[in-house]
Image (cartoon, helix red, strand yellow):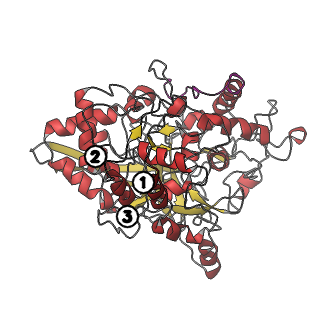
Amino acid sequence: MRRIVDLLRRAPRGWKAEQTDQPATGVVGIFRHTSHLAIAVLLATMSPTALALAGDAPDLPTTRTDLSEQDRARVEAITRPTTDFSRPEEYELMQGGAGTSRKRVTADAFSQSSANITFEEEGTFKLGNAIFRKNWVSSPSSTQASDGLGPLFNARACQTCHLKDGRGHPPEGKADTTSMFLRLAREASTEEEKAQRAERKVLNFPDPTYGTQLQDLAVPGLAGEGRMRITYVEQPVTLGDGTKVSLRKPSYAVDGLGYGPMDPATTLSPRVTPAMIGLGLIEQIHPADILANADPDDRDGDGISGRPNIVRDQLTGELALGRFGWKAQTPSIRQQSADAFAGDIGISTPEVPRHWGDCTRAQKACLDMPNGVQERLGPVEAPTPVMDLVTFYSQNLAVPARRDVGKQPVLAGKKAFYEMGCASCHTPKFVTRRDAPNKAQSFQLIWPYSDFLLHDMGEGLADSQAVGDATGNEWRTPPLWGIGLTERVSGHTFFLHDGRARNLTEAILWHGGEGQIARDRFAAAGADERDALIKFLESL
């Protein structure tokens, strides 16, 4: 795709773009020269990398199946990387498309509904928000539709982990680990398990005693599984101009294991909860547009080898493109919600009908506890109407508008972002599908600053835990939209998958592997250029 963009950028002067105001979609640029339009369409439909990557998943489209030839040209034009940093790009302010929230920035900036949903949908959104915030309780109880918690769990409500729908944090000076947990997994150890992995029936394998994640909380009468322990070692770094920065390198362990030892092969991967904004828009990025940016063999020689995580959709049984989670292991918001209900809260859903959550056969006391299934409501603790509401809520949390988008330091920082190579992974913009199920997410120009691909980020950030196609060194490029409001919404500035970075500068300096070149350019830059880059990130 990058070579296609280069060809488009070098198009003959006969190519002219007609600027068309499209406030509902933010898409501009219709090519008038029909012969060159045909070339653009041909280039856009010939992606050998995408074809190769989709080989294991033949149902994944390698071209945009939702666009007319005219639409293709418009999309190519508007998503072309900018070379003009003297002023903001058109529609750059509205980074979440027509659904962008223009409300005053407060601590609730991530909890606003998409601005373009209907009045009726606004009611659905509020009902979903109520379920997202409600505390589940242990069984049996008199609350009827709210019991079923655990028996082992990490939080009583979705909102507990995703406080104000924002970014989680590591425990700092207290025992609060409700927005961070340890994922537990091991590699295949038998031929049967290897076959399951090869067929993508599983992402990896849980610890035989403690399951897929460490749950430090439990209902009355039951012991929690253990407590996460983090130890930090400070590592000094000297930048090119002599500025000294200290990075903290974490190591992880578990204290007070309540059910015996873990399997020696089990790895611990810390995960903080990501912000919830823009998920419905990410879900409607066409798979072909994500696959087109993949370059696993680094054919263009830029040192970036992003690749997709092709996973099996547990709801359909089909292979799909993973796009959510720190390792791009989840293909849809509904599956992500169902997994979180089961793993984080211990609530069963039609999609993941595990009434005892993450309890394993080795935890008999857990399995002996009552569950919260109410016969009149169906065979699970959170039936389909609950999942419908939570999914809709998660799909329609608005992305806040940019700030200071036209100020000179921000524009200078944007130029540095491109020139240092950050945009090679943090792809600025996409246009969502024409055929999205909800018009609110249809044909929107969005600015997530992510390619949603896996990248080897080096040994410094490695967790030694494979998840589907993702290796222990690989992480999905996290979207950057909203990152500048982290402190306002979440009350902290901890970044990366485990919150080790205490600010954006530290987060950049932790980049290794495919991010090493951009990291080194940032470290070698002068203070003014580094400060400008940070100001640009804070404007997102």
Total tally of numbered discs in the picture: 3
Q: Is residue 10 above or below residue 266?
A: above
131 vs 182, nearest the viewer:
131
Please, what secondary structure does the residue beneath circle 3 have?
Answer: loop
In space, the residues marked 2 and 3 are separated at their CA atoms by 18 Å
Q: Earlier in the sequence, mark 3 or mark 1?
A: 1
Q: Which mark is residue 418?
A: 2
Residue carrying label 1: 36
**Which secondary structure is most common in the magenta stretch?**
loop
Mark toward the start of the polypeptide (2 vs 3):
3
Q: Which residues are magenta?
A: 108-121
Estimate the x, y position of residue 8 in percent, counting from the top left.
37, 53
Q: Name the residue beneath numbered marker 3.
A: 305
Residue 14 location in percent, x, y? Answer: 35, 48
Amino acid found under the numbered disc labelled 1: His
Query: To which quarter of the image does residue 89 belong?
Result: top left
